[in-house]
Amino acid sequence: MKRRQFLGLLGAAGITATLGTTAQAAAGKTFEGHPDTKGVLFDATRCIGCRKCEAGCNKVNKLPAPAKPFEDLTVLEKDRRTDEKTYTIVNKYKGSKGPVFRKFQCNHCMEPACASVCFVRAFTKEPDGSVSYDASVCVGCRYCMVACPFNIPAYEYDDPLTPKVVKCTMCHPQISSGELTAPGCVSACPKEALTYGKRDELIDIARERIRKNPERYLKHIYGEKEMGGTSWMYISGEPFSSIGLREDLGTTSVPAMTSGPLSVVPMVAALWPAFLGGVWAINKRKEKVAEEEQKAAVKAAKAATQADADAKLAKAMDGAEKDKASAIEREVKRALEEAEAARKEAEAAENTDTPEDNDGKGA
Amino acid sequence: MSTENNKSLMTPANIITGIILLVGLIITVLRFTKGLGTVTNLDQNNPWGIWIGFDLLCGVALAAGGYTTSSACYIFGLKRYHSAVRPAILTAFLGYALVVFALHYDVGRPYRLVYPLFVQPGTTSLLFEVGLCVFLYVTVLAIEFSPAMFEWLGMKTLRNKIHKLTLALTVFGVVLSTLHQSSLGALYIAVPSKLHPLWYSPYLAILFFVSSIPAGLSMVIFEGTLAHKPFHHMMDKTHLDEHEGVILGFARGASIALAAYFCVKLVALAADNNWHYLATGWGAWYLVEVLGFVALPSLLYAIGSREKNIKLIKWTAALTVFGIILNRFNVSMVAFNYNLPADQRYFPSLMEIGISIFVVTLGVTIYRFIVSRMPIFFEHPEYKDAH
């Protein structure tokens, strides 16, 4: 499996979710680097700050001539870093027993931050241990520079349209073509402060040196575990932080840090539509239910009003009926009474008439 | 319909706009002939400046009004915010389009911006995730915005077809926004050694996503306030009637969202046990951000919506927008590379600031052009039935 693919699997748990079988293949395995991967061991107790490594690097990589010649050691007074014309630099630090020098360049991480954060995969961890850069796809976003814990990648800020990221290649092109057998800096070192070899063996060599000279070295190989391990490692008699190597970086690699947030990505894509669709559907249903309830309520209210009206009408009708009946009764009664009264009157009149008549007749 | 056209173009606002655009064009020429080294203060230790910190991070956060407003209206069923949707979608669309535009200045080879999508995708990168989502979301926003344009152009059939996609587009927009808003924060999860512990957190993704909600809601209030006076004549009765309701409702939402954001901030602080940093100078600065620009606006929004104090709400919106910008600046610049000596720290050049102002001005100009012509603040008389 290619290093790059491994990083892909480790980092993008999200993407692997769609590639079930590959993800499972990776799940039960740990990748501890390509077999026989190479590296360089730097021994700060041997370095004399002669800048021969800088000159050697400049020569084999055909880099532009430096501002000050490599023989000029006054540049060591200033703290320097790699830039777009320099793959490696040596810095001078105050040690407890006089000056200490430390060479710096790309550390060729075992799980490179630059490679894992690059959105066009411009960086590759090669089987020989080097981290290579492919300018033909680089967009120039400079996230690699942001992510590198060692502040190594440099950028051609003065190139308006075709700027490249620049960093040490561990002489990968020259070594793989057979032009060189070891990186230019290593071959140029007159004090054997640099050792090129298989990483596993370099760790053995470092341990051996520390074990044999415990008074000369601190019991730590810088780069064995830092940021998930690096191919370029350091041993020193002075605390690493006093020779410009941060001791607070931890042992977690960048791909391990970012795999968590990446793994959430497909979950959001998978669950959000269901959640949001659900909320929408609930609201839609609520609206529908509310509408139906409203309709039902209106219907019920209408019915109730109707019934009420009917009842009222019925009552009114009933009342009217009764009124009518009583009116008729009343009328009948009155008519009867009137008739009775009329009859009585007529009778009375007859009675008075009769005596009159009687009187008149009788007279 | 457009009274602006009848007036003379030589208004003070137009003259200032013209000067800014001209200066911007000059810096643009410099950027693409002399390179980033001439125009910016970026260097080998500080590869990202305000073109990332402001144009990208703030641009995306403040354009969150698009997904918050459209989801409130179409998904959460708050239909009385309907008149706020079109202005919010337009702002979001312009915001994202300008983010993409501004990136052309920042990246070294802008003609390769599609490489991560179509040539060699680096799927392990959170920046790939950002790129993919921003690309898709700009497309979604363009489609969401297009009905306004088609109504203006009188293309009825096309407009009605797209109008039917509203719900699907809204859901897709929320998914994409959740992803890239959070991924912008997650970009910095890779750099625990460079970002100050008070701002670094494994929860950066959640912090950026949650804070984008009050950012978006506040931006809708803020922008509505700015647009209300100059474009009052373009607003129909519905828009004007709903205006106050939108402000009150969004204030309530933003208050709750800020409170939630404050809680996530607390959790992030506690999870890494960073309390002891609060007693340092960085801690004081952190407290200014969290108390002054998260807790305070949350409280002010609550008071404002309770007492229906529109003026207070509008000022609080400005405070919140400023607070979000402050947070993004802190993460990307102020607290980034905090361990470098002062002389190696980054401060933007005048030309960098010039381009950022140029980009914002460009956005405002296009916004003015569109709202004084297309049905943004009013409903097109022929399409009232669709709402």
Image (cartoon, rainbow, N blue to C red):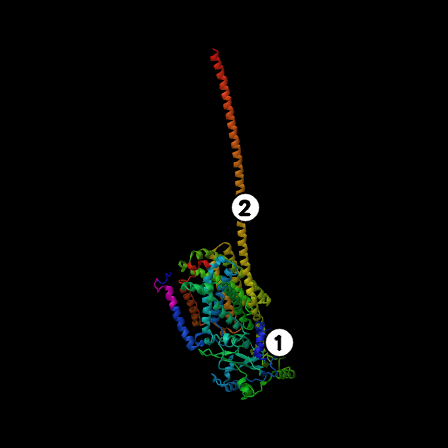
Residues A96 and B166: in front is B166
Does the segment drawn in magenta span residue B7?
Answer: yes
Magenta segment range?
B6-18
> Can you give x and y, in whole percent of width and height, for residue A291 in the image?
53, 54
Q: Is residue A358 above or below residue B125?
A: above
Q: CA distance from mark 2 to mark 1?
A: 72 Å
Q: Residues within 10 Å of mark 2 (few under 14, many from 20)?
A: few
Q: Residue A255, how many percent across, how many down?
A: 57, 74
Which quadrant of the rendered structure holds the N terminus of chain B?
bottom left
Q: Amino acid at mark 2?
A: Ala
Where's residue A263, x and y in %? 58, 70
Q: Are marks 2 and 1 on the same chain?
A: yes
* Residue position marked by numbered label 2 in the rendering: A304
Q: Is residue B48 magenta?
A: no
Mark 1, chain letter?
A
Chain of the residue on which disc 2 is drawn: A
Q: Who is closer to the viewer here, B126 or B157? A: B157
> Which residue is most to the front?
A361
N-terminal-most mark, 2 or 1: 1
Q: Which of the 4 image quadrants contains residue B155?
A: bottom left
Q: Which residue is mark 1?
A: A25
Neighbours of disc 1 within 10 Å: few (<14), some (14-19), many (20+): few
Task: Tell me if residue B60 can be seen.
Answer: yes
Q: Which residue shows up at 54% across the image and 84% down it?
A: A172
